[in-house]
Image (spheres, rainbow, N blue to C red):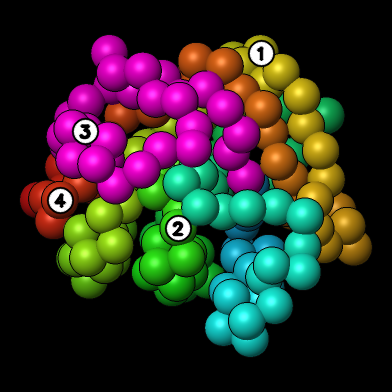
Amino acid sequence: MKIIKLPINSLSINDIKVGDSILISGKIYTGRDAVLPKICELITNGIIDDYCFNLKGSAIFHTAVSSAGIGPTSSNKDEIEESIPILSSHGIKIHLGKGKISDATVASLNEFKSIYAVVAPVSAFLRSRIISQKLVAFKELGMEAMYELDVKDFPAVVAAAHGVSIYK
């Protein structure tokens, strides 16, 4: 089990391999198909710094936040998978979700020294790992808004790193 404290840098990412079990502590952000294109638009338009969050060295979890808990959504949805290279280029180091991602996405993760890890879909268990949560952007999207979660020992398994995927 590898312990990850966020924010994380590219040198630390080099020590993480496909198949590693990881426990993440620190602030992670949430985003699904509704919010991730909006975040990418902020990056593309150069106005991301106008918002009260910093993606550098962070993790983003492909999930919504509700009172029932949190659980991963499929990361290979177009809106999500297309966001991964842009978010990685802007500093996201760990993408959390579920399911196979394309070879092109695996290559983009490698290019930006980022990784993809899968999270078991166990909402109540994951909810117990959240210390606090704060709405940070796009309140109008309800549970699909962007949240900042402060987590402790958040479990995942690395599914893509350094140009290699467990799905091959």
Give the amino acid at mark 1: Ser
- Return the x and y of residue 4 as percentages of the image width and height: 39, 25
Q: Are marks 1 and 2 in contact (CB under 8 Å)?
A: no
The residue singled out by tag 2 in the image is: 91
Q: Is residue 4 visible?
A: yes
Q: Secondary structure at mark 4?
A: loop
Judged from the image, the secondary structure of the residue bearing numbered disc 1 is loop
* Relative horizontal placement of residue 37, taking residue 131 as reference (left or right): left
Camera-side mark, 2 or 3 = 2
Q: Which residue is mark 4?
A: 162
Q: What whole-number distance in Å separates the C-alpha atoms at marks 1 and 3?
A: 25 Å
152, 57: nearer the viewer: 57
Local crowd size for mark 4, using a 10 Å CA cut-off: few (<14), some (14–19), many (≥20): many
Magenta region, residue range? 1-29
Instruction: Reply above or below: 21 against 56.
Output: above
Q: CA distance from mark 2 to mark 3?
A: 17 Å
Badge 1: few (under 14), some or many (20 or more) residues near its Cα, within 10 Å? some
Q: Which residue has dot 1 on it? A: 128
At horizontal 36% and vertical 43% (from top left) the residue drawn is 9
Find residue 124 and report its image quarter: top right
Inspect the magenta stretch and tell me whether residue 13 lies in it.
yes
